[in-house]
Image: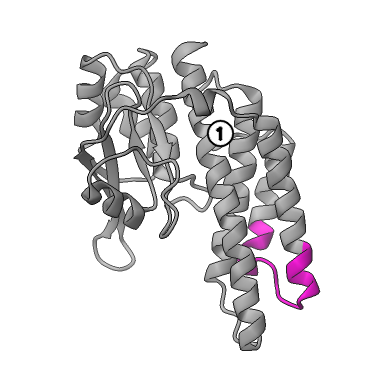
Amino acid sequence: MSEHELPAGVRVALWGTSALQGRMPVDELPRRALPDVDEVSGLVEGMRLWASLGERAVLVALPRPGDVAGMPRGPVELVDAATRAQECVFVPQLGGALVPTLETFGPEGDQGWSARWTAYPAEPVPTHRIEALDLGQIELGLRTALAGSTEELLRAGAPPFGPHADRGAARARAVRDGAGSWGLPDGLPPRALRVIDLAGTVLRLADAGLDAVTGSLDAATTAARAEVLRRLQSRATTALADATNAAALHLAYRS
C-alpha cells in the first residue's frame, strides 16, 4: 500500500458518500478510494444496495482492541471483524456495515493488494453527536497531545517515532503548505480536511513508532514509550474518524 495511505475505511466513507450523492458512478468507487489496491470485491455491490435504498452518507469507525467507540450496534461477528481489521464503514440512516480484509497476493517481489469487503447487519446510528463535534477543539487537542507525547518520550530518553519520523514530518510540511490532501474528493470543509490531514499524519507516526525496533532501551523505558505511543495512536484514531464523519455528513447534507 502507499506509504502515505489513509485507512481504507476513511477513503471509502468520503468517496462512497460522494457516490451516494451522484457525484460519480458507484462503479468508480474502488478506483477513486483505493487506487493502490489491485483487486476489490464486495464494495461496489454493498454501495449499490445502499444507494438503491436511498442512503445518503457513509461513515467510518476505526476500532482497536479494547476500544470500539464509534462502532454501530450490531452482532458480535461485526465487532470482532471490525476490531481485527481496525476499521469498518457503515450507513447511519438504513443501518448496515462493510468490513475490509486487506491481503497481499502473488510471488515475493511481484505482490499486489486485494480488499474483500464483507457485509454485516448493524443498527441505524443517530448523527447528532457527529453534528455537534467541535473540530477546532479536536485539532487543538491533537496538536497538544502530539507535542506533549514528543516531549515525554524525549525526556525519557526514548526515540519518539522511529525511522518513519522524517517521512511523517515531510507529510506534515506538505499539508501545511497546501499540497495534495491524500487524494480525497472535492467539497470537503476546510477545517475537517485539516483535521483529517493532521490526524492521518499523527497516526502514521504513532504506528511507525510502535513498529520500530528499540533494542537499545531497557524494559521499563520500552514499556513507557509504548504506552505513550498507544495513547497518541488512540487520540489520532478518534480524531480521524470524527473528522471523516463530519466531512461525510457535510457532503451528504450541506454541499
Residue range (magenta): 151-167
Colour scheme of the picture: one colour
Q: Main secondary structure of the magenta part?
A: helix
Is 156 colored magenta in this rendering? yes
Q: Position of residue 215 (x, y in %)?
A: 59, 86
Q: Badge 1, how many Cα within 10 Å: few under 14, some, many 20+? A: many
- Going by the image, does 188 lie left or right of 119? right
**In the rendered image, which quarter is residue 141 located in?**
top right
Depicted 228 relative to depicted 3: above or below? below
Q: Which residue is mark 1?
A: 243
Residue 120 position within the rendered picture, expressed as x and y whole percent measured from the top left:
21, 40
Left or right placement of residue 173 versus residue 253 in this view: right
Q: Nearer the viewer, residue 209 or 31?
A: 209
Q: Is residue 68 magenta?
A: no
Give the quadrant of residue 125: top left
- Residue at horizontal 35 percent and vertical 12 percent from the top: 22
* Number of numbered labels in the structure image: 1
Residue closer to the observer: 215 or 103: 215
Side of 119 where 137 appears, left or right: right
Q: Amino acid at mark 1?
A: Ala
Q: Residue at x 65, y 88 (%)?
A: 218
Q: Residue at x 78, y 71 (%)?
A: 154
Rendering coords of residue 6 (x, y %): 49, 44
Position of residue 72 measured from the top left corner of the image (x, y, whole percent): 35, 37
